Image: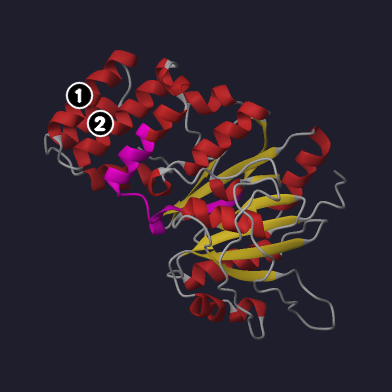
Amino acid sequence: MSRTAASVGVVIPTRGDRPAQLRAAVEAALTQDCTGQVSVVVVVDGGHLHTVADDLHPVVGGGVRRSAEGARSGMDGGGPHSAGDDGVRRPVGGGGAPRPAVRVLPNRFTPGLPGARNTGIAACDTDLIAFCDDDDLWLPGKLAAQTRLLADGGAEFASCGIEIEYGGRRVPRPAGTDRVTAADLVRSRMVMVHSSTFLFRRGTLWVDESAPRGQNEDWDLALRAAKRHPIANADEPLVRVRWGASHYVARWADRIAGLEWMLARHPELAVDPRGAARIYGQLAFGHAALGNRRGAARWAVRTLAARFGEPRAPIALAVAAGLIPAATVLALLHHRGRGI
């Protein structure tokens, strides 16, 4: 793949309930200093297409042609679905020089984040696919750094460091490596390998729409990518991840289902003692947050059996005993740029 020829399709799913942040995410993608053409597909999942298109008016200018057509079934394009290129596409900017295309489409596949991402992938004809959540922000140089990595190293998939924004603070979270392997992602979730950092060759990967309520679809995708070829990582904070606005942070039953789905889908996660203890500890904490003391105790025992020093076990037991609320634990961790 030629570095100068690599075009990038940016997929941004949205529910339409964060218009200011969505505008910022689209603008940050359009203003990247990437040598190839950059286009943006905003996929509306459960929201109103017209409202989202109108919300983007300050960024992309004139009237928007909106698409509400259903998907065509089939396997063309190398993925689980196919979709026509019939959404919003219009140049913006002045002086006769068009800016990159922006399209607004409805989610044509399974409702939820995985289906929205796959709708965006199917709508793109670019060399590369990038993801960005509608509440996150690419920083300058993100695409340039990652496209260089893919062009120079022959990798299929790239990530980068992040900075976590929470409660008015920003905490950088680099990975400490320029190469992320499957073993790394088994041992640790590696929060910096975040969906908003993903850049990969179109046609190599699709999001698994069986992920419960979209939980851990990004971890699963990164792990599948790393099993194919180590992930190239630009290890500097090039994406701002805003935790305060997440739709998923406290949906404990969904988080439990997502972790159990990962254990079933990737059995190797239960083999590495450190990685297994981390997941079991998260399950213990999730049950504690739901008030399920028995479930929390059961998973805490499994956590300590896998790795006695895993701190999530006593934290989960403290929450289950009512000594500290789960929300307080999360707030304390998030202020440090950490999660449970």
Give the left or right position of residue 315, taking residue 260 as reference: left
Front residue of 231/239: it is 231
In percent of width and height, residue 81 lies at: 60, 52
Residue 139 seen anywhere in this rendered image of the structure: no
Residue 232 seen anywhere in this rendered image of the structure: yes
Q: Is residue 164 above or below residue 56?
A: above
Q: Amino acid at mark 2?
A: Ala
In percent of width and height, residue 160 lies at: 63, 42
> Pointer 1: residues within 10 angstroms few (<14), some, or many (20+)?
some
Res 9 → quadrant: bottom right
Q: Quadrant of the C terminus?
A: top left
Residue sitting at x 13%, y 29%: 294
Q: Which residue is mark 1?
A: 298
The numbered disc on residue 216 is none
Residues at discs 2 and 1 in contact (Cβ within 8 Å): yes
> Which segment is the magenta one?
238-260
Q: Is residue 243 magenta?
A: yes
Q: Which residue is mark 2?
A: 284
Between the residue at mark 2 and the residue at mark 1, the CA separation in whole angstroms equals 7 Å
Q: Is residue 157 magenta?
A: no
Res 314 → quadrant: top left
Secondary structure of residue under mark 2: helix
